[in-house]
Image: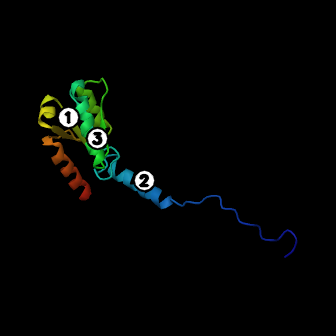
């Protein structure tokens, strides 16, 4: 070739190795609008103690849920009970587990959904089985 008309090495400016993954994530975000299904949610369970006396039991429940592979948090803040529940709803936790004196004595938790539907009291073992079933069924 003539001088100055030789082919130059091409330079790639943009490469989207994860472009399809990013697009799929965007579609999921738009579809669910922040209300992720339990199996996909990064915020599955928030444990809310009614009083600070029950913090230790709440942490035990959280540890059991973590051991089973679930994402769980405990709200140990000094906020009021109503504020704790509201914060968990705003943060889009799938379930809020309310713990008071009766729950500690019975080895249970009181379950509320993200939509403030009270599902009642369940033993921790039954709750774990229920959550595993939800996860297996992709709910």
Q: Secondary structure at mark 3?
A: helix
- Residue at the far bottom: name it: 1
User: Which numbered disc covers residue 98?
Assistant: 1
Q: Is residue 24 above or below residue 100?
A: below
Q: Secondary structure at mark 1?
A: strand
Residue at x 37%, y 54% (from the top left corner):
28
Residue marked by disc 2: 26
Q: What colour scheme does the image use?
A: rainbow
User: How far, Cα to Cα, is label 3 from label 2?
Assistant: 32 Å
Residue marked by disc 3: 63
Of 57 and 95, which appears nearest the observer?
A: 57
**Image location of residue 132, percent across then percent down:** 23, 53
**Image location of residue 117, percent across then percent down:** 17, 40
Q: Residues within 10 Å of mark 3 (few under 14, many from 20)?
A: some
Q: Is residue 67 above or below residue 89?
A: below
Left or right: where does residue 32 sit relative to residue 102?
right
Residue at x 21%, y 48% (from the top left corner):
128
Question: Which corner quadrant holds the C terminus?
Answer: bottom left
Q: Which sits earlier in the primary sequence, circle 3 or circle 1?
A: 3
Q: Is residue 78 above or below residue 96?
A: above
Q: Secondary structure at mark 2?
A: helix
Residue at x 30%, y 31% (from the top left corner):
75
Of 74 and 119, which appears nearest the observer?
A: 74
């Amino acid at each position: 070739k003539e001088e100055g008309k030789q082919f130059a090495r091409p330079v790639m400016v943009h490469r989207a190795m994860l472009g399809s993954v990013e697009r799929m994530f965007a579609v999921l975000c738009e579809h669910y609008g922040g209300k992720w299904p339990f199996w996909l949610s990064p915020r599955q369970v928030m444990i809310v103690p009614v009083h600070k006396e029950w913090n230790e039991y709440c942490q035990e429940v959280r540890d059991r849920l973590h051991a089973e592979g679930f994402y769980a948090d405990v709200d140990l803040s000094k906020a009021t009970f109503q504020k704790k529940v509201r914060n968990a709803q705003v943060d889009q936790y799938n379930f809020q587990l309310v713990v008071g004196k009766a729950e500690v004595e019975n080895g249970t938790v009181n379950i509320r959904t993200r939509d403030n539907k009270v599902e009642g009291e369940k033993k921790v073992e039954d709750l774990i089985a229920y959550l595993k079933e939800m996860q297996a069924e992709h709910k």
